[in-house]
Image (spheres, rainbow, N blue to C red):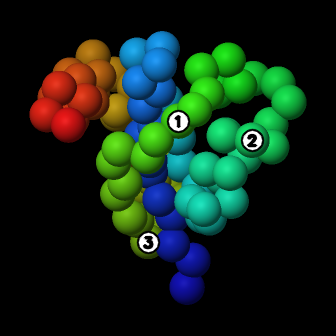
Amino acid sequence: MDEFIVYILFSEKFNKNYTGYTSNLIERFKSHNSLETKGYTLKYRPWKVIHVEFFNSKSEAIKREKYLKTGIGREFIKKIIDNR
C-alpha cells in the first residue's frame, strides 16, 4: 500500500515556507535541499521539515495540500511556525 505525505518546509534564513506532497519524504527533502537545479525551493535553502501529515491516497494528500495553500491553511502554517 502506498502512503502519501503532505509536508511543510521552512527556511529560517529567508522566513519562507513551502508546502507539498510526496510518497517519499526523504528523497523529496534531499531534492529540495541539494539536488534541484531550478525552482522556488532552490532560492531559499536550507529548508527544515516542520510538519508532516500521512494519507492513504494521493487524492487525499492533494486535497490537503490545496487546503493548506488557502487563507485558512496559511494561518494554520503560520501558527506552526510561530510555535516552533
The residue tagged 3 is 56
Q: In the rendered image of this protein, does residue 71 appear above or below residue 25?
A: above
Kindly state the secondary structure of the residue where label 3 is placed: loop
Residue at 51% of width from left, 64% of height from top? 4
Kindly state the secondary structure of the residue where label 2 is placed: helix
| Residue 76 visible in this rendered orientation of the protein | no
The residue tagged 1 is 47
The residue tagged 2 is 34
Residue at 34% of width from left, 34% of height from top? 67
Residue at 67% of width from left, 17% of height from top? 43
Q: In the rendered image of this protein, does residue 70 appear above or below residue 32?
A: above
Q: Is residue 14 left or right of residue 82?
A: right
Q: In the rendered image of this protein, does residue 17 appear above or below residue 1?
A: above
Q: Residues within 10 Å of mark 2 (few under 14, many from 20)?
A: few
Q: Is residue 76 left or right of residue 63?
A: left
First-in-chain label (3 vs 1): 1
